[in-house]
Image: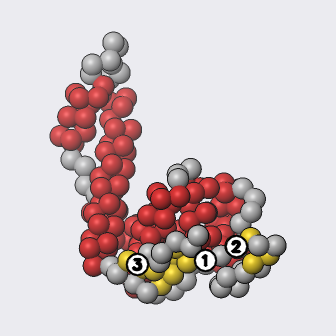
Amino acid sequence: GFTGGVDAVAGTLLERTVAFVNKKPVLLSDVELAKALLQVDEKQAVERAIDESLMFEDASRLLSQPPAEDAVAAARLSLEQKAGPGFTLPALRRKAVIQIAIANYIDLRLRPLVRVEDAEVRQAFNERVISEAEPPAFSRVAVSLRESLERESLDRKIEEWISALRRTAEIRRPDPRP
């Protein structure tokens, strides 16, 4: 099981700290889980785990209570199916709690800031759709275009949030062990 330290079984390292974010550890298991879920390499997974740690810390300041246990259990099961075997239940549960907190923060703080004007939807139609051989009627694609523009806007707001968090964070990466 997970002990929070370093265990060695038959010479295999089970856990170690890959970075510190505002003096809190980012664990190898968090990075391995990010690699499995996001299909990214080790370096990208470390950066994503750091971003997630920053977002969770910020979200935790706003959210007054932990997520409901049934929501955590459902999210953990979903993560287990996506990540595949090899991850401990505590690691999957920790990831589920983190993801739920971040999603709740985004819904409370960032999503309300997303506004897509009708003129932006019309412009997107003119740029993305009108050049098709037989373009659909504007009314048939307006809703999906608006949703796409809203997702893009929310993604930008999330990136801005992460950038702001990184500017004020203390991020330290210990020297890798041989």
Identify the element where label 3 is drawn: strand
Above or below, comparing residue 153 to residue 91 in the picture:
above
Residue under numbered circle 3: 172
Q: Position of residue 136 (x, y in %)?
A: 35, 21
Quadrant position of residue 155: bottom left
Query: Would you call the spot at circle 3 few (<14 residues within 10 Å), some (14-19), or many (20 or more)?
Result: some
Question: Horizontal and vertical percent for residue 28?
Answer: 59, 71
Asked whether, in this view, residue 67 is left or right of residue 164, the answer is: right
- The figure's colour scheme reads secondary structure
Q: Is residue 103 visible?
A: no
40 left or right of 11 in image: left
Q: Quadrant of residue 32?
A: bottom right
Closer to the chain start, of discs 3 and 2, is: 2
- Residue 61 in percent (x, y) is at 40, 85
**Which residue is depicted at the point 65% across and 76% down?**
15
**Which residue is pictured at 22% across the width and 27% down the height?**
126
Q: Which mark is residue 13?
A: 2
| Res. 140 image quadrant | top left
Give the numbered dot on residue 16: 1
Q: Is residue 70 above or below residue 123?
A: below
Q: Are marks 1 and 2 in contact (CB under 8 Å)?
A: yes
